[in-house]
Image (cartoon, helix red, strand yellow):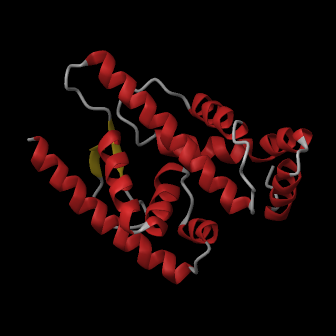
């Protein structure tokens, strides 16, 4: 059932004010959308991965409700934090898998932009996380936009709205992020080879 952005924002404000029933209602309102976004992201995950969209959403939700000091601004802010939580879940699982195996095998994900003709790049999720962390050191806004695109599956318009920028600026930032990340990830591959 589609929801109106104002409904989500009202529930977020009520949750911020301490209304736990609003928090629970919020999850029922956004669950299907979060599940759809998680499923879209996991389709690009390495073959044979074991995490299902439902588990990713639930783990991200557990981390979201643990946020005590967030003053929720709006729907975009919520999806931004949800994207960060999904990223952390995936990175934590990749790190754990890598530590458990210690065989040098990488957890692979495909970073692609279906709307563009750029060929998909097969990268390790830990490499992507490290590249995003480096990007954040000098361009936090572009990093957040990329995180929203990769991990929350937001469209450029939705991601731009969440970051608080126009669609034209979001398009420029996304183009810059893709180019920079592509270069960084190729450099990481050459270093590892």
Q: Is residue 156 above or below residue 59?
A: below
- Quadrant of the image occupied by residue 108: top left
Q: Is residue 167 above or below residue 29?
A: below
The residue positioned 48% from the left and 55% from the top of the image is: 147
Q: Nearer the viewer, residue 111 or 117?
A: 111
- Tell me the quadrant of the picture where the C terminus can be found: top left
- Quadrant of the image occupied by residue 142: bottom left
Is residue 30 shown left or right of residue 99?
A: right
Q: Is residue 132 above or below residue 172?
A: above
Q: Residue furthest top?
A: 100
Q: Residue furthest front?
A: 69
Q: Position of residue 157 (x, y in %)?
A: 59, 71
Q: Is residue 138 above or below residue 59?
A: below
The residue positioned 19% from the left and 26% from the top of the image is: 104
Q: Position of residue 51 (x, y in %)?
A: 50, 27
Is residue 122 shown left or right of residue 8?
A: left
Residue 126 visible in the current orientation: yes
Q: Nearer the viewer, residue 16 or 123?
A: 16
The residue positioned 13% from the left and 41% from the top of the image is: 192
Q: Position of residue 166 (x, y in %)?
A: 58, 81
Is residue 90 shown left or right of residue 158?
A: left
Q: Position of residue 35 (x, y in %)?
A: 64, 40
The residue positioned 38% from the left and 62% from the top of the image is: 137
Is residue 56 shown left or right of residue 92?
A: right
């Amino acid at each position: 059932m589609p929801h109106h952005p104002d409904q989500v924002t009202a529930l977020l404000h009520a949750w911020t004010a301490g209304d736990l029933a609003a928090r629970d209602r919020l999850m029922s309102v956004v669950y299907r959308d979060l599940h759809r976004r998680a499923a879209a992201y996991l389709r690009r995950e390495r073959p044979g991965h074991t995490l299902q969209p439902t588990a990713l959403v639930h783990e991200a939700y557990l981390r979201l409700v643990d946020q005590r000091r967030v003053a929720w601004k709006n729907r975009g802010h919520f999806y931004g934090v949800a994207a960060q939580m999904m990223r952390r879940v995936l990175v934590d699982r990749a790190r754990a898998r890598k530590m458990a195996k210690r065989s040098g095998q990488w957890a692979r994900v495909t970073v692609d932009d279906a709307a563009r003709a750029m060929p998909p790049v097969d990268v390790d999720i830990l490499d992507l996380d490290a590249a995003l962390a480096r990007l954040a050191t000098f361009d936090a806004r572009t990093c957040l936009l990329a995180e929203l695109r990769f991990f929350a599956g937001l469209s450029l318009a939705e991601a731009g709205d969440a970051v608080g920028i126009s669609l034209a600026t979001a398009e420029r930032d996304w183009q810059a992020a893709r180019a920079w990340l592509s270069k960084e990830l190729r450099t990481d591959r050459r270093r590892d080879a």
